[in-house]
Image (spheres, helix red, strand yellow):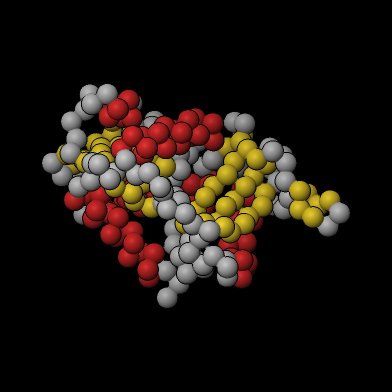
Amino acid sequence: MPDANMENGDFVLGTPALVCRWRLSNKTLPLENRHLRALAARNIDGEAIKTELVAWAKQHIEWTLQDGAVSNPDGVLMTIVDENGCAAMSVGPYEELGDTRLSALLARADLARKESEEVGVAPEMLWVAKGGTLMREARPNSVPSGAVSLVTDLAKTLGIRINYVSDLLRKVQGRQIDFDEAFLVSDEHGIVPASDCAGPEGRRFASGYAKLLSKAGK
């Protein structure tokens, strides 16, 4: 998979068609395999991501991430693909969400939902819980992001029931569905409980995610 085009010795990338933002910890990518599977499920203008691009991304992570993340060991790895299929990776600092109210998390999840309609995978998803049951958006034939697949697998391991609800965001916003708590599941931010609608399930997954990050690279 080729890197971005070269002009006068500098990398030049065309108009970005896809941008993935993955959280790092200690210069490693804890959810590497999950993120790469989700990358392979994405598409650009209706065409599936080429296997060469996924192989290129894996090679860059294995060969250059340790050196590239020296300045931001707990930062964010950005994978950018332009409309011509050329790609580049860079590492930047991580910034926590400034607004974690339910309304803000809903807005982020809605933007991610719209992104999934274009490229096939939503990088963030809102989950809600009621009486020990989790509820998440039902996306027919969709592949989950790396973080969403992690939470889904953890819930199944813990024996927590998951209900897949169509048009969940609209129902949550209009209070047309009964729930006790809400949290965002994000490739960049991990598990973020809503500050005005937090609860035990979101805190449990957030704690587990934090432990995963703390063990990375050790």
Instruction: Describe residue 195's horizontal placement relative to residue 179 as left or right.
Output: right
* Residue at far right of view: 8
Q: Report if residue 45 is visible in the image.
A: yes
Tell me where residue 96 appears, x and y as whole percent.
42, 53
Looking at the image, how many numbered discs can be counted on the residues? Answer: 0
What residue is rendered at 29% in x and 60% in y? Answer: 208
Q: Is residue 166 above or below residue 70?
A: above
Tell me where residue 210 appears, x and y as whole percent.
34, 62
The image quarter in which residue 99 lies = top left
Tell me where residue 39 appears, x and y as whole percent.
53, 47
What residue is rendered at 49% in x and 46% in y? Answer: 38
Tell me where residue 184 appears, x and y as whole percent.
34, 44
Instruction: Describe residue 97's horizontal placement relative to residue 194 as left or right.
Output: right
Quadrant of the frame with the C terminus: bottom left
What residue is rendered at 42% in x and 42% in y? Answer: 124
Q: Report if residue 166 is visible in the image.
A: no
The image quarter in which residue 108 lies = top left
The image quarter in which residue 171 lies = top left
* Residue at far front of view: 98
Q: Is residue 139 above or below residue 33?
A: above
What residue is rendered at 25% in x and 41% in y? Answer: 196
Along the line of sight, the residue nearer the viewer: 197 or 143: 197
* Residue at far bottom of view: 218
